[in-house]
Amino acid sequence: MRTPPTSSVPRPLPTKPTFRSFASSSSSGSSSSSATFSNPSKAHPLRLSKRWPRLALTLLGVTIPTSYYFFPSARELAPHMYSDQPVSSTKSISTQHKLVSIPIPSSSTSKEYFTKPYRTVGSLADVEGGEIVIQHMMIKSPDIQIERPYTPINDPLADGEVRLVVKRVQGGEVGRIVHSLKEGDKVGIRGPIPTYSIYPQNYDKIIMISTGTAISPFLQLLSKLPSPAPIPSQSQSQGQGHTQAAIPSTAPKLHLIHSKPMQGREDWANSLTDSSFLPSLQDKFGDRLQVTRIDPGPVPKAALVEALNPGSQAGAEKDRILVLVCLPPMLMRPLCGNMTPNLDQGPITGILGEMGLTNEQVWKLE
């Protein structure tokens, strides 16, 4: 991907804060205190009096940032700090999934992270040059202070709100919190945080492979891609008023390979519940977007062959093809190999590796 203009130095993206539970923090603090004041009654009075200011400063140093981070009063929506934002609507779209809408505060500071998004490396994205950044949000539980990432399904800047599909799983504390939310409730949230950035015009075809809620980054990408531009057809030029969609020559073809839900489960992504779901997106792109539904389980090679070489065309230029994969590890491994433990891409193995694709054509999303 090409480097954006460097005429101005962008402000660095704040480092992601590390979560620690109150139990861990307080047990560490108590062991430290007991080591310093193992027997305060025998300590020299002057030495003890000198220790108290240091202890007070230490406690302030821990308490103030912790209170600021976990219990912020700011209303700004920012990637480096939590704030309590009101929920505008919630809707159950399946027995396990809930659609939650959170408005973006009207302040320019909150909107700036959407209008001027960052790449994952911390530099500003080249939005004017056509670069699109897929972003995610973090939501925390106020009870045990853990956070979980959720990817908006929509274009938050265009819609003025963040819409999230949250699945509730057994033992999922943050999911339980989100599923209990009602309109008007507040939720602790921070973001947007960059997940991946792309210059769509650099590719002839973009293939997206997902299952379940892992479709979310692709719904966001499709929502952010521009609609095909209408041009007058021959009949319109003759005064009949009809138009046909014309795709710019730089726009890629799009192919989504998405697993069907398990038998008896709702196919929420294929419903009319939201304008960012598949029916609306297929209306938006027409035949420029192909959707292939596969049975639950490993991605079949036949679907990949058809996506990469439609009509068995020989000699297709794979260097102009991008394959985006968002699958759980057990499904990603046989397809292209898992990400490394520190979430680097790792080599391309599995079916895609056997088909000759490399890290230049394949990108894995967590």
Image (cartoon, rainbow, N blue to C red):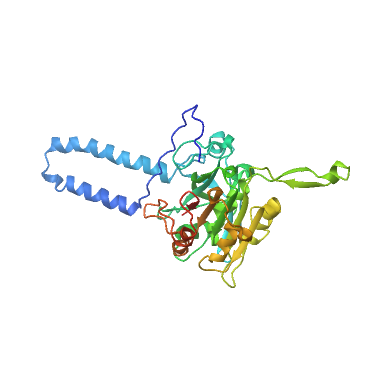
Where residue 13 sits: x, y (%)? 44, 38
Where residue 177 sits: x, y (%)? 49, 57
Count of all numbered marks drawn on residues in the image: 0
Picture residue at 68% right of the left edge, 51% below the top: 285
Residue 262 or 345: which is nearer the viewer?
A: 345
Q: Can residue 249 be seen in this view?
A: yes
Q: Is residue 34 left or right of residue 90?
A: left
Picture residue at 68% right of the left edge, 46% below the top: 227
Q: In this view, does 142 lie to the left or right of 116?
A: left
Where residue 296 sits: x, y (%)? 54, 68
Where residue 293 sits: x, y (%)? 61, 64
Quadrant hosting residue 131: top right
Residue 212 or 4: which is nearer the viewer?
A: 4
Residue 255 or 172: which is nearer the viewer?
A: 255
Direction bottom: furthest residue? 263
Q: Can residue 180 be seen in this view?
A: no
Q: In this view, does 38 lie above or below 55?
A: below
Q: Is residue 309 above or below residue 55?
A: below
Picture residue at 42% right of the left edge, 58% below the top: 338
Direction right: furthest residue? 239
